Each structure stands twice: as structure tokens, then as C-alpha cells.
Image: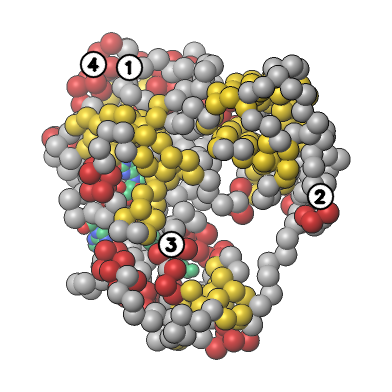
Amino acid sequence: MLNVPSQSFPGPSSQQRVASGGRSKVPLKQGRSLMDWIRLTKSGKDLTGLKGRLIEVTEEELKKHNKKDDCWICIRGFVYNVSPYMEYHPGGEDELMRAAGSDGTDLFDQVHRWVNYESMLKECLVGRMAMKPALPKDYHEEKKVLNGMLPQSQVTDTLAKEGPSSPSYDWFQTDSLVTIVIYTKQKDINLDSVIVDHRDDSFRAETVIKDYSYLVHVALSHEIQEDFSVLVVENVGKIEIVLKKKENTSWKCLGHPQENHNSFIPKKDTGLFYRKCQLVSKEDVTHDTKLFCLMLPPSTHLEVPVGQHVYLRLPITGTEIVKPYTPVCDSLFSEFKEPVLPNNIYIYFLIKIYPAGFFTPELDQLQIGDYVSVSNPEGNFIISQLQELEDLFLLAAGTGFTPMVKVLNYALTNIPSLRKVKLMFFNKTEDDIIWRSQLEKLAFKDKRGKDFRNSAVPGPPDLRLNLSSQHLLLNGVANRDTFHQLCSLNF
Ligand SMILES: Cc1cc2nc3c(=O)[nH]c(=O)nc-3n(C[C@H](O)[C@H](O)[C@H](O)COP(=O)(O)OP(=O)(O)OC[C@H]3O[C@@H](n4cnc5c(N)ncnc54)[C@H](O)[C@@H]3O)c2cc1C
Ligand code: HEM
């Protein structure tokens, strides 16, 4: 019997995990696609019923608007009249009604934190809640000028008790350099734990520690050069970001605090941060899937951890649309690299283009040199759990193969104990198999991968595999029955 580990893939609250009853998108009526919705929002129709007026909404008022034809929902302190959107909601009317007349922020975040509701519902904005959500304690009391280490980061009361201990930061300078040091107080920190963006004078370093995010966010007091370096001293959990001064003058202070500076809050409560990346190449992989290569700005340090995804964002007829994608390597044969300086600047994606889809045809229309926004990584898969692995068994279907690429790459180059890797790859037809010849070559070249299997038939494949699997990674297998049949077979 296959032994499915408790920490299976994707993680319990991952976007990659299908809902308990299978995927819950509903068929929408004719004329109710996202494009139809965007058209309606641009039509000039009064979608709130308030003739463009914005109001302050009390809790009592919000509660009254709880019917399908009069439905208000509050998300992050803003109230929207979602009645006009009901028939356009891909998750269905009943799902939307679960938040009717109430604060739907948690519900919304549980299902699709990444959906860009602000842009999609801007014509449905009724106003703000009369009671604003509480700001972190002492927010307004923080020093306006930063000059050295602050005594204690802004940790909201409820979190401080359960989460990891709060990091802190400091800075020092030489004639030509400014070094910002983040003391994470954690040992399992590496280069993908910190994401740095420098844009105009705004400097932002987000450090991810377990499920929490620590932010250093300042408007720098002086100009710096475009490139910088990031160093991690793993055994003491110290991160050093070395900035190059534009002029060799002495800085009196680091800069001025920006939004959420020096805060340490659960990652789920932070917004998604995006930077614009340039499309540098696009090549066909199968009849409908392409390999996109995006280049990060030189003033960004971002490594997407193995098994995690990012969100791509594009303006489509004036509305910002967001979809999740999992970065891959440029090929199955690229050596797994521990990130080296300078920053890895390319991110690759294998993306299936759906002719009738909303986002992918727009992505496909991009020309080399065009820009697309890329978010910070998300996901809770931790690659270190595979460290002692002997046998690795991967199941994937269609583009659900994408997370397996880096897992495979990592496993084959970084796990000394690994003896055997098996990949079951479900596809509709043989033509749909992504990187088929690479997989075959890899299986031939690397004896540990001799059982890569490409199944082009739906349903349970030939399972005459001689496998004592300890780890099962599952992605993209949409049919739960198939999954259960697989689990009950003797491997
Ligand atoms: C965590 C995560 C990682 C992902 N990684 C990748 C990746 O690496 N590569 C990749 O290619 N994809 C990936 N995806 C899928 C990706 O996010 C998009 O869902 C996909 O690209 C489709 O986008 P689209 O807007 O073009 O198509 P959509 O507009 O979503 O349409 C897709 C298809 O469904 C049909 N459809 C849409 N709505 C309905 C409806 N209500 N009823 C019936 N049919 C409908 C459309 O006609 C079309 O054929 C990932 C998804 C997740 C959750
Ligand atoms: C707050 C209550 C809400 C609930 C419970 C809810 C629930 C859902 C569910 C279950 C899905 C299907 C998810 C899937 O199968 O992948 C979905 C999809 C979607 N919802 Fe909501 N939703 C809510 C609010 C909203 C709001 C306010 C918007 C506003 C824009 C919205 C926009 C979308 C979009 C765009 C999708 C499709 C996502 C995709 O492309 O995969 N939802 N929703």
C-alpha cells in the first residue's frame, strides 16, 4: 500500500490544493465571462446604486444588504455592492453569498487572496467601513527618522505570543557602502528567504520566516546605485544587504519609514508585492504550451523557493488581472544552483495557452521587451523535508507538471541519498506531454530516473511499478477518484 506522508504536496492551505469537493468553479451563463464583466464596468452604468457617491458604512447598514439583488461585502475595510457581479463570479453566486452583508475578508483570502478585487470591483465601491481596521500598536509613534536599530519591531499583540520571535535590523556604513543587517533569530534562513526591491528612493526588504513576514521599508535618505548584494550567514540567521552609495558622503540616517516598516506579521495578512519584469524570450514547447523567460529588474533580489508559485499580473482592458504560475528551470538538464551573486535574474515559466481563456491569450500577445508584473512567491512546500530521501515518486497532470520540474532538478542534484525517482505524468494526448524528449533523455542519462512515465491516457495508468515509495508528491490530478485508486494500489 502506498504510504502517503502527512506533509504531502501541495501543502494543506496551498492554492495548488483542490477544494475538498473538487474544483468549485461553476459554469457561467452565456455573456457572463470576465471580459463581459469588464465591459459592463466600463459601460458607465451605476453599479452601486449610489450614483457615484462614496459613503461611510456602519456595521448595521452593511448587515441589511444581505440578499442576492442587494448584496454588500466588506473586504479590507472597503464595502462593495457585489449584486451586479453575482452572475459573473466564477465561484458561483452561493459562494459569494456566504459573505453577504458582512466582512468577507477572511473568506475571500482563504479561497483566492491573489484575486485583484480592487481593480475588478472598482465600479462597485460603496465606501469605507465607518470603523477602520486597527493599525499595529505604536504605528504612529515610530521615529520619523531612522538612525540605527529600532528597539522593537511592530508585532501585533495576538501574533507575538504564537509566532517566531521578532527579527530586528540595524545599518552601518563605510565611505562607499551602506549595509543593512537583518537579525532573523532563525537558523534555517537562506537567500530565498529575503526579497529585496529598490525602486526610486524606496527600499523594501521582506524576510519570510515560517508563516511570517518581516519588512524593512524605507525611503532612503541618499541615492544608491542600481545593483546591490545580499548575503546570508545561515548559522546565525543574519542577512546583510550591501548597497553602493552614489556619492561617497556620510549618511546621517538610513531614511524615512514607509508603510508597514519594521513590522512582523503573518504572511497571509500582507498584500502581494509586484515588480515589473521584462519578457526576454518565448518558445514553443508543445502545440499549446510555451516557455516564457522573464527578466527581473536589476534592483530586485528574488529567488522563488522550490515548490512555490508567483502571480503574474497584466492590465487587460484597463483592469488588473492576476493568475498564479509556478516557475521552472530553463531545462530539465540545468544544474540545480545554489543562488550565487549577482542575483539570478531570469525566471522561466511553462504556460499553457487557452485560446478561450482570459489571461493566457493576453500573455501570449506580449512582445519581447514588454513588461508583466510578478509577485512575491507564495506556497508552503518546504524542500528540506526531502533531504534524507531515497525514493521519490511524483504524480502530475498537464501543466501540474511545472512544480515537479524544480523538485526533480533539486532532487537529482542535491539529495545524495536519492536512489530512485519515478514520475507519472498524466496527459490527454501524447502531443500534450511537456518536455517529453528531455524526460526520456534524463531517464536514460540518470539511472535514478529510469522510471519516468508519460501517460497519455486519462484515468489510472499502468501501475506495474516496483516502488517502495516514501514520499508522494501530487499535483494537477484533478480527479479525486483517480487519486484514491492510486493510493489503494500496491506499489
Ligand atoms: C498554484 C497554481 C500554479 C499554477 N501554475 C501554472 C503553470 O506553471 N503553468 C500553467 O500553464 N498554468 C498554471 N496554473 C494555472 C493558471 O493559473 C491559470 O488558471 C491558467 O493559465 C488559465 O488561465 P486563463 O485565464 O488563460 O484561462 P481561463 O479564463 O481560466 O480559462 C481556462 C479554460 O477554462 C474554460 N473556462 C473558464 N471559466 C469557465 C467556467 N466558468 N466554466 C467552464 N469553463 C470555463 C475556458 O474556456 C478555458 O478553456 C497554476 C494554477 C495554480 C492555482
Ligand atoms: C468573499 C466571498 C467569496 C467566496 C467564498 C468566493 C469563492 C470562490 C470560489 C470557491 C471560487 C472557485 C475557486 C476555484 O475553483 O479555483 C472563486 C473563484 C473566483 N472568485 Fe471568488 N469568492 C468570493 C468573493 C469574490 C469576490 C469579491 C471577487 C471579486 C472580484 C471574486 C472573484 C473571483 C474570481 C476572479 C475567481 C476565479 C479565479 C480563477 O481564475 O481561478 N470572488 N471564488
Q: Is residue 345 above or below residue 341?
A: below
Work out how far the residue at label 3 is from the one at label 1, CA to CA, in angstroms: 40 Å
Kindly report the distance in space between the C-alpha atoms of the residues bearing marks 4 and 1. 9 Å
Residue 441 disc label: 4
Residue placed under numbered mark 1 in the picture: 333
Q: Residue 402 — which label?
A: none
- Left or right of 246: which side holds 25? left
The reply, left or right, for residue 64 in relation to residue 148 is left
- What residue did someone put label 2 on? 142
Name the secondary structure under disc 2. Answer: loop
Q: Which mark is residue 119?
A: 3
Q: Amino acid at mark 1?
A: Phe
Quadrant where the N terminus lies? Answer: top left
The answer to which of marks 4 and 2 sits earlier in the sequence is 2
Determine if the C-beta at disc 3 is less than 8 A from ligand 2.
no
Between circles 4 and 3, the one closer to the viewer is 3
The label nearer to you, 4 versus 1, is: 1
